[in-house]
Amino acid sequence: MSVKSGNPLSILKLHLHAACAATALLLGVGSLAQAADLNALIWCDHSDPALLQPFEEANNVKVNVKEFEGTGAGLAIVEQSQPGDWDVMVIDSIDVPRGVEKGLFEPLPEDKLPFADLFPQVKMDGSTVVGGKRYGITEKFGYNTIGFNKTKVDPADMQSLASLTSDKYKGKVAIYDYYLPVIGMAALAIGKKTAELTEADLPALKEELLKMKANAKLVGEVTASQTALATGEVDILVGGGEWVTAGLAKENPALDFSIPKEGAVLWSQSLAMFKDSKNKDMALKFIQYIMSPEGQARLATSSCYWGMPANTKAALTDDQKKVLRFDEQPGFLARAQAYPAPNGDLNKKMQDMWTEMLQAK
């Protein structure tokens, strides 16, 4: 997946996939099942039998899923398929317009979906509504922020991004190796808005990143950084969040995350229906199920990775809500900002800056 493909959130999911133990029911393109089945292009959190089986049994239908990593890869699968091969797709919320531009998606009937129950900040109207029509519905979201071991650090310190560059935690920090969210965190740390970054901000961002790197024991992809936090090799993960700590909470209740006063970087994923689906009624039923309180709870706590359900009425247990910090979401969302979305030239310069940070001693 090319970083320049315009789907900055999807690398996060690509990395998450590497940390997943969930097994997908892989479905070969060109050997799709009969139209009575439902064929879904999904991320690994949708391959959990605990999510799919209740829907299959209730509707006497088989859900065939194919996992993909990154919007570019998902759209490539569609291009290699016949029209009507696929019914629904999971996609980064910010990438919904890419599918609409290609003429792939069917407008969703807003009166048949629980839009009124969604957290207002994650409706993502700027990308899920195109030309006045709704093509995607946000199903799950979360944050790139500070993950930490609350028995090893002062949780009060984790309420500020300044702690990431403090001598107090030198050598106790891991940095998640994906440039956009961590550059977003660096921007928040120096008082910049992620949506307004320009080339003029690069020197200050680089200085902040180098200060983070000076404190870090390692910079690693999801598995390495998550393992470092879980085993106690480090006490803080820059870029972590509920998607790292929540699924480990039962085995390691000391792991937690914060949304510091300066804010955090928000990711979100949506469901869309294909215009050429031969099974639109069942496709809509599937989207309705995923967005139902029960479906939302199962998706939020999927074996591949946990995340916040978009529906405020998700049927989570009290313990699950506590792990996800459910009751604190309105305040978290008020402080969250979107991924930086640099244009091609600025994107390249940000990647170069990230490489310099990685190579710094």
Image (tube, grey):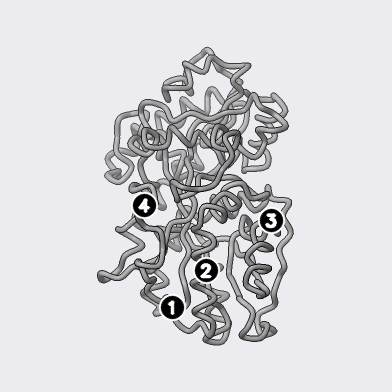
How far apart in space, not on screen, are marks 3 and 1 (Cα)?
29 Å
Residue bearing the label numbered 1: 104
Q: Disc 3 residue type?
A: Ala
Q: Secondary structure at mark 4?
A: loop
Label whose residue precedes the other's in the sequence (2 or 4)? 2
Q: Secondary structure at mark 1?
A: loop
Badge 3: residue crowd in 10 Å (few <14, some 14–19, many ≥20): some
What is the x, y in percent for residue 178?
52, 44
Residue bearing the label numbered 2: 89
Task: Choose between 28 and 342: the one closer to the eye.
Answer: 28
- Contact? badges 3 and 1 (CB < 8 Å): no
How far apart in space, not on screen, are marks 4 and 1 (Cα)?
23 Å
Residue 346 visible in image: yes
Label whose residue precedes the other's in the sequence (3 or 2)? 3
At 48% across and 44% down in the image, what residue appears? 142
Nearer the observer: mark 3 or 4; the answer is: 3
How far apart in space, not on screen, are marks 3 and 2 (Cα)?
19 Å
Label whose residue precedes the other's in the sequence (2 or 1)? 2
How far apart in space, not on screen, are marks 3 and 4 (Cα)?
35 Å
Q: Disc 4 residue type?
A: Ala
Residue bearing the label numbered 3: 50
Q: Which mark is residue 341?
A: 4
Q: Which mark is residue 334?
A: none
At 61% across and 85% down in the image, what residue appears? 35
What is the x, y in percent for residue 344?
37, 58
At 62% across and 28% down in the image, what residue appears? 255
Q: Secondary structure at mark 3?
A: helix
Label whose residue precedes the other's in the sequence (3 or 1)? 3
- Contact? badges 3 and 4 (CB < 8 Å): no
Q: Disc 2 residue type?
A: Met
Nearer the observer: mark 3 or 2; the answer is: 3
